[in-house]
Structures are given as structure tokens and as C-alpha cells.
Amino acid sequence: MTEEQPVVAEITREARARCGAIGGGSLDAVEALRAELEKNPTLGRQARSAVGGMKIYTTRLDGTRTSPTLTVTYVYDAPPPAPGLIRIALVSPVRFAGGGTEV
């Protein structure tokens, strides 16, 4: 029986700063996603990647009473045999047709 290597997920300094600028519970929502990604690193939709074994994903976090709807982009790098590393790199509020960010 082989033991699976753990995946480590982190929020980059830039993404953390962006959450602070967006406000409204954004960091809490992204932190919850970070914890979920350690269990399921391929959530979201995979985008093309031109860099080796790195995979780029985007996912949408639906808004709640405390957080706006967000689009989150992260990079999943899993070179064997080291544990995979996920970097949440970009956080953006979702803009709807009206031009504002809706919750």
C-alpha cells in the first residue's frame, strides 16, 4: 500500500493583497478554497499551460452575504516525487452586465 503525497496549497502575497482590496470576506472565501484544494487539487476548469508539468485552473466562488462572487486562478505543480504545490495566484471579483460587482 503506497501512501499518497500530500498537496500543499498557498495563497500568494499578490492574491492575498487583492483579497484585501476587494474586501467583503474575500480572504475568508479564498482561504476556504485553499483548504479544499489540499484535498481536491483539480477543482475548477483547466486552462492551457505552456510551462512543463504545471497546470493552470480557474474556478468561481459564488457570492454570499459576506463575500462577493470571485474568480480564482491557481497553478498546480506536481513534480514527482515531491508533494504537489498549489499557488492561488489571482483573485478577481466577477463583474456582471450592470458593470458592478454583485453579491
Image (cartoon, grey):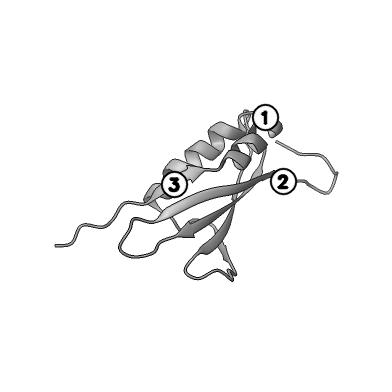
Q: What residue type is labelled 3?
A: Ala
Q: In which quarter of the image is residue 14?
A: top right
- State which mark lies toward you, 1 or 3: 3
Residue displayed at 51% across by 64% down = 55
Whole-angstrom CA distance, mark 1 to mark 2, is 13 Å
- 70 w.r.t. 65: above or below: below
Q: Give the position of the C terminus as an image quadrant.
A: top right
Which residue is the site of mark 1? 23
Which residue is the site of mark 3? 9
Tell which circle, 1 or 2, labels the residue nearer the N-terminal end: 1
Q: Are marks 1 and 2 in contact (CB under 8 Å)?
A: no
Q: Position of residue 90 (x, y in %)?
A: 63, 48
User: Dot 1 lies on which element?
Assistant: loop
Q: Position of residue 22 (x, y in %)?
A: 70, 34
Q: Give the position of the N terminus as an image quadrant.
A: bottom left
Which residue is the site of mark 2? 94
Q: Quadrant of residue 101?
A: top right
Q: Which amino acid does label 1 sit on?
A: Gly
Q: Which amino acid does label 2 sit on?
A: Val
- State which mark lies toward you, 1 or 2: 1
Tell which circle, 2 or 3, labels the residue nearer the N-terminal end: 3
Between 22 and 12, the residue placed more toward the observer is 12
